[in-house]
Amino acid sequence: MSADTTPHPEAAPVRNRFDRAEIAGAFGDLGTLIPFAVAYIKLLGVDPFGMLLAFGLAMLAVGLYYKTPWPVQPMKALGAIATTQAAQVAVITASTVYASALVTGIIWFILGVTGAAKRVADLVGRPVALGIILGLGLSFMLDGAKLMANDWWLSGIALFLTLMLLTNRKIPAMFLLLAAGAVVAVFRDPHLLSSLAAVHLEPRLPSFALASVTWHDMMIGTLFLALPQLPLTLGNAIIAITEENNRLFPDRPVTERKVALSTGIINLGGSMLGGIPMCHGAGGMAGHIAFGARTGGAPIMLGGLLIFLALFMSSSVAVIFAMIPQEVLGVILFLAGAQLALGSCDLSKDKGERFTTMVTAGLSMWNVGVAFLIGMAVYHAFKRKLIRV
C-alpha cells in the first residue's frame, strides 16, 4: 500500500471533518460489521432495529468525543461463539446476547473506573502490543483473502483499482468499490432489484430490550459469552487501539482507562436498546484510515446512517446488506489489515523483543487472548534473562 495512505499526525485537524474522504473512510469497517450483523440476525433472531440503533448511537458518541476515526465493532470471539452455538452445553438466544452485552458493559466500566485496565496494560511491553497489532493485521488480510477467493478475477480487479484510487480525493476508492459491488450483486441476482423496489420507510421507536432477559440468560451470557471475550478485548480493543491511536494521532491521545470506560458505556447503553456486545477494535481504525478518514467525522456519519436505517428501514436491512458482495467485503477487510499491519513495522533492534513480537503476532492470528498471555510471559522472561534466542 502506498505510504501516502498513512496519516500525518502533525497536520491532523482538531475538528471533525465531513468531506468526501471522511464519507469514504466511514465505510472502511464494513468488512467486520456486516458479516457479524447478518449472522446475529439470521441465526439468533436478533432484532436489527436495536442492534443498528446501538451501533449508530455508539459511533456518534465516540466520533464526537475522540475526534479520530474511532471504531465501534462487534466483539469477534463472543460473536463467533454465539452465532455458531459453540457453547454446546447451552442454547444461545437473542436475550442471551443482550445479557452478555450488559455484563460486558458492567465489567469494562468497573475496570475503567477502578483503573485496573490501565494497571494491567502497564504490564504489557510494547513488543507485545506491536505483536497483537501485526497479528491482527495479518489475520484481517487472511480473512479478506478468503472472502475474495469466491471470485478471484472480480476480487483481483477490485483490489487493483481500489489501490490505484486510495490516494485520489476526487474519486474516493470506497465509493467506486461499493457502486461496482452493487452492480455485481444485481447481475448475480436480478431479483434484488424487485426487493429494493419494495423497500419502504417503517418508523419504529426504541423499547427496553432487557425486559425479556432472565437470570438464566444472564448466567449463560456471562459464563459462555462475556468472560471468554475479556482477554481478546483487552489485547485488541484496549491496548492495541490505544497504541495505534497515539501513534497516528499524538495530538489526540487516549489512555487505556478512557478506552475501557468507553467500552463499558457503549455496552451498557447498547444492551438496553437490544444491541450486541461492541468494542473498539484496532482493525476498525485501520479500515477507516485506509479509505481516507482522519477525524471523528467518519464514525459520526456512519453512525447517523445506521440510526436512520434502524429508525426507518430496519425491516429491509437484509436486502440492503445483500447489495454488498462478499468479494467487496473481502477487499475492504484485506486493505484494513494491510493498514493495521503497516503500523507495526517499527520493530525493536533488540533480538529478544523482536522475537516476542513475532511470537505474539503468530498467536494473534489464532487467538488474541492466548497471544496476549503468552506474549506477556515471553516478554518478561526475556527481561529477566530466563530465555535467550
Image (cartoon, rainbow, N blue to C red):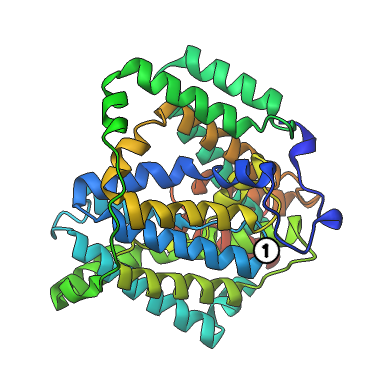
Of all residues, the one furthest to the right in this rendering is 10
**Residue 230 at x, y = what percent?**
42, 66
The quadrant in which residue 157 appears is: top right
Residue 149 visible, this orientation: no
Q: How many marks?
A: 1
Q: Quadrant of the N terminus?
A: top right
Q: Position of residue 38 (x, y in %)?
A: 31, 43
Q: Which residue is denoted by mark 1 in the rendering?
A: 67
Q: Foreground residue, 375 or 122?
A: 122
Q: Is residue 357 left or right of residue 204?
A: right
In the figure, is residue 228 to the left or right of 20? left
Query: Depth check: 190 or 122 in front?
Result: 190
Closer to us: 56 or 139: 56
From this view, report whether residue 264 is shown above or below residue 186: below
- Identify the residue shown where x is 70% and y is 65%: 383
**What residue type is disc 1 on?**
Lys
383 lies left or right of 219: right
User: What x and y, as percent, mark residue 357?
Assistant: 64, 50
Element type where label 1 sits in the image:
loop
Please state if 147 lies on the left or on the right of 226 as rendered: right
Circle 1 packing at 10 Å, graded few (<14), some (14-19), many (20+), is many
Give the camera-side residue of 293 and 374.
293
Q: Residue at x 68, y 68 (%)?
A: 384
Q: Decide: is 281 above or below 2.
A: below
Residue 161 location (% of width, % of height): 63, 20
